[in-house]
Image (cartoon, helix red, strand yellow):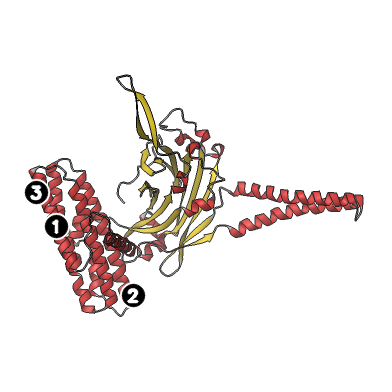
Amino acid sequence: MIKESVKKYGDYSLEIKFKFRPEPNTRFQKFRKYKVDTYFFLPREMGVNVKNYTKKDFYREINSYIKIDPINIPFDELVNEDDELSRNLVSAFVNLIAEDEESVDVMETLMKVYLNVYKKSLKREIKSISKAGDFDEKTRLTERLLKNIKLEALFFRSLSAHIKKTSDSKVEYIYNTGNEYFSTVYIKYLYILFQYFGKKNQESLLIKKHITENIDEEHRYRNINSFPIIIKKNFNKNNEKILYRWSVIYSYINNKLIIATRFDKENKWLIQFYYSLAAGIAMIFATGIAFYYNSVYGNFTAKFFIVLVISYMFKDRIKDWIKDLINFFLKKETYDHTINIFNEKDQKIGLISQGFSFIPTSHLPKDVLLNRQTNIENEIQDVSLEKIMHYKSKAKINASMLFKMFKNINIRGVNDITYFNTSPLLMRMEKPDTEVVFLNSDNEIESFKSEKVYHINMILKYEYLGKVMHSKYRIVLNRNGIKKVEKVQLLDSDSPAAPQDS
């Protein structure tokens, strides 16, 4: 199974995520493949084209990585320690040998995966509270969460007893960093929960008081353990240091979940072979002309010299024409480069090939063109005037080796994540503030400022196990950045909805 998700990431970037879930029986099969074609339809007014936005520009603005996706565990099960992950985590701490690198690595990996699951479970729980039907239900779920999150903190912090026995500074550092991450996530989501109770009535004040009591208690714990807690309203260097520290901790906790990758040139020997053929054909033409006219005009004559120069002029052009022809026919099958995926033993377990180009409307697949013309927001839009960027990727993953990588962890699959920075696309846009004039009820001219926006339509076409699926998104943006990302409903019933949770 494969699912897509596209959302705004910061002011200027898109997060394009594909969740790859090999079916259970594929654990014993060697490879699974999926292919994704992403089409960006840019309005002509943006001024982006193949001359001012090259492959190099595109690849400079994307960042791709592969991240394992542990199973979802409901928060109440995580609290009750009934799941396999919690039991394995306790076992890793109980049997920890500080002098044994493998033992420490197992403990570190399990702890980081556990904290990732904890964050996802807490996030889903908070989201379910936001969707609660009435105030009483929202209050009941909140009280349950506040109780469970305290129990979760007690469980995770009880593991510190096993760390203290080792008296090892490296092991203590690993656990303390994880504990600070736990605390930061704890407070972050309680702040989010607090904002769900905005009304200033007696019932709302009571539940908000319970939330703030939990926050204050966690702040005291952070103070005792020398975790930074003070964020002041006015910007200062202390805030800057704290925010930077948090970003480093988040990266540290997630590093065990990101699979090692290395770049390689795609089809470099094949392409060079075809280019050599092109040069050989051009050389045959030039040499054939030279031999023929040598017999006609003889050596060292002016006419033979002119023919020789002209034949070599055409030789270079013929070589370039053949190379362009080869590139045209190989475009669908060749990619710009490959990202090789490795396990912890540096064994290759898969690859992801990537390619980018501008394509004319006439080269669009019929299903993609049909989806572009579906649910057009403005009926006077002319699709033929748009510039189309085509980003393609093809993944091949050894499913059995993937699951063997994490023998102590039950995973669902991997997330293929790409961050795309749109900043260079905004350079030629007009000013975001546009003055609009109108005639008011007193027949006087008035004016006001309004935002001018552009729409980039994005079509995703992805294939897995012989099934083709489509999705469409509309990206609303201006020179100040991305305003919003909208999912557009397609006629194609096979197009799955974007998943809501991460």
Q: Is residue 13 left or right of residue 155?
A: right
**x, y percent for residue 370:** 47, 34
Type of amino acid at the residue the image marks with label 2:
Glu
* Mark 3 to mark 1 CA distance (whole Å): 13 Å
- The residue labelled by disc 1 is 214
Q: In the depicted view, which residue is nearer to us: 20 or 104?
A: 104
Q: Is residue 17 above or below residue 493?
A: below
Marks 1 and 3: in contact by CB < 8 Å? no
- The residue labelled by disc 3 is 206
Foreground mark, 3 or 2? Answer: 3
- Label 1 SS: helix
Q: In the depicted view, which residue is nearer to us: 432 or 146?
A: 432
* Mark 3 to mark 2 CA distance (whole Å): 49 Å
| Label disc, if present, on residue 102 of the rendered structure | 2
Foreground mark, 1 or 2? Answer: 1
From this viewpoint, is residue 114 visible? yes
